[in-house]
Image: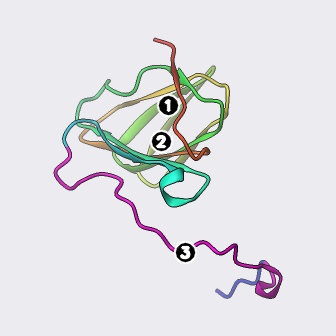
């Protein structure tokens, strides 16, 4: 499929170079494997990696002043976003809108692995539990 969503001649580079950063070291232990702030890349998003092996476990209830997008890479999760409860499996994406308290948990079987995209160059969070 060929896409032509915009005219490339109308977009000017802003002078930034490509940058690489580490999200997590290969031997990282624990559920929070790492984060990469957008500031480190000169970008507008922060990326986190989360995973655990235990059904019922996950991050505590919290809120951000920006949107958060969750990508389920492996396993199954139950997301609690405000009054909504959403189950998602590998390959699915869930949005946590800014200002809405949210949390998620592994619902098994096996490992839950997510990539969490914070729509901010820095990770800002208030835990509510």
Q: Nearer the viewer, residue 128 or 38?
A: 38
Whole-Å distance between the Cαs marked 2 and 3? 35 Å
Taking 68 as reference, is 61 above or below it? Answer: above
The image shows residue 120 at horizontal and vertical percentages of: 61, 44
Residue annotated with mark 1: 79
Q: Secondary structure at mark 2?
A: strand
Classed neighbour count for the residue bearing mark 2: other residues with Cα under 10 Å, few (<14), some (14–19), many (≥20): some
Q: Earlier in the sequence, mark 1 or mark 2?
A: 1
The percent position of residue 85, horizontal first and vertical second, equals 55, 27
| Pointer 3 residue | 17
Answer with left or right where residue 35 lies relative to residue 5.
left
Kindly identify which numbered label has been placed on residue 68: none
Give the farthest residue toward the front.
15
Is 54 situated left or right of 8 in this image? left
| Dot 3 crowding, Cα within 10 Å, few <14, some 14–19, many 20+ | few
Instruction: Specify the segment rendered in magenta.
Output: 6-28
| Residue 84, image quadrant | top right
Which dot marks residue 88?
Answer: 2
Q: Nearer the viewer, residue 32 or 42?
A: 42
Q: Nearer the viewer, residue 116 or 1?
A: 116
Percent position (x, y) of residue 77?
41, 36
Residue that appears at 68% across and 88% down:
2
- Classify 10 Å Cα crowding around label 1: few (below 14), some (14-19), many (20 and above): many
- The answer to whether mark 1 and mark 2 are in CB contact below 8 A is yes
Q: Is residue 32 above or below residue 89?
A: above
């Amino acid at each position: 499929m060929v896409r032509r969503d915009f005219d490339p001649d109308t977009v000017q580079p802003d002078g930034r170079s490509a940058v690489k950063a580490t999200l997590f070291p290969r031997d990282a232990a624990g559920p929070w494997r790492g984060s990469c702030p957008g500031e480190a890349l000169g970008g507008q998003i922060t990326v986190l990696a989360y995973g655990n092996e235990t059904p019922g476990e996950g991050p505590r209830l919290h809120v951000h002043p920006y949107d958060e997008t969750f990508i389920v890479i492996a396993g199954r999760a139950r997301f609690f976003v405000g009054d909504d409860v959403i189950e998602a499996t590998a390959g699915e994406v869930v949005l946590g809108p800014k200002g809405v308290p949210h949390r998620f948990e592994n619902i098994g079987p096996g490992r839950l692995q997510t990539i969490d995209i914070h729509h901010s160059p820095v990770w800002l969070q208030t835990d509510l539990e």
